[in-house]
Image: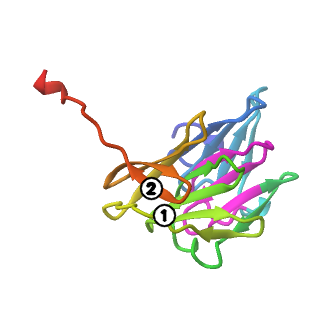
Amino acid sequence: DNTPALGSNGVPGLLVSSDGSLWIGTNGGGLIRKSVAGAFRAFGKDAGISSPSVFSILEDHAGAIWAGTENGGVCKLFAERFTCFDGPGRLRGAVVRSLVEDSSGRVCAVTDRDSYLCFDGKDFQPEALEGLKTGGSIFTATRSPDGSIWLGTAGGLYRLDGRKAEPVRSNLIPEDAA
């Protein structure tokens, strides 16, 4: 075993938050916070986390911590306790692969069900993205400093312009062709 405090050797999610804490999403051991001082704190069902598997972690512009789970939706930390949202059933049974905050401050989730859902202040709602051809899966999302949201999919790389997904074309030369 690696670090016994983790409760699981599988670590699919990591985040260093603005206070310097390391947040560790585990595959079966819940969410763990390692403080700057080195103390570990586990967040599991007793702290409101709806699933022991946390695949993605985000700190939003206000400093709130969000955790994307397997089969348990997205959970947000409020005063050392998590509140979970399941997108009226749309996140139940799904793996939240990635969390991203858009330029308007909405937290959005990418799932293994080829879904892109954004928090409306009450719960996660699906976003229809025009032009997105994922090849069956959205794997990840990130935001660049200019506010653009980038999606990595089985069908290639996309940049969101509002609700329009624009495929990114490249003229890269493969390494072995040089």
- Check disc 2 and give the amino acid type: Ala
The spot of residue 129 in percent (x, y) is: 48, 63
Which secondary structure lies at badge 1? Answer: loop
The spot of residue 103 in percent (x, y) is: 66, 46
Relative placement, left or right, of 135 versus 130 is left
Depth order, front residue of 163/72:
163
The segment highlighted magenta reads 49-76
Q: Which residue is drawn at 78% across and 31% down?
A: 19
Q: In the image, is residue 72 above or below residue 24?
A: below
Check if mark 2's residue and mark 1's residue have beta carbons within 8 Å. yes
Residue that carries the numbered disc 1 in the rendered image = 129
Q: Is residue 155 visible?
A: yes
* Residue density around tag 2, few if under 14, some if 14–19, many if 20 or more, within 10 Å: many
Q: Which residue is drawn at 71% across and 35% down?
A: 17
The quarter of the picture where the C terminus appears is top left
- Check disc 1 and give the amino acid type: Leu
Depth order, front residue of 70/139:
139
Depth order, front residue of 169/101:
169
Q: Residue at x 55, y 43 (%)?
A: 148
Q: In the image, is residue 171 above or below residue 31?
A: above
Depth order, front residue of 92/110:
110
Residue that carries the numbered disc 2 in the rendered image = 165
Q: Is residue 7 visible?
A: no
Q: Distance between the residues labelled 2 and 1?
A: 6 Å
Q: In the image, is residue 127 above or below residue 158?
A: below
Residue closest to the far left? 177
Relative placement, left or right, of 17 versus 8 is right
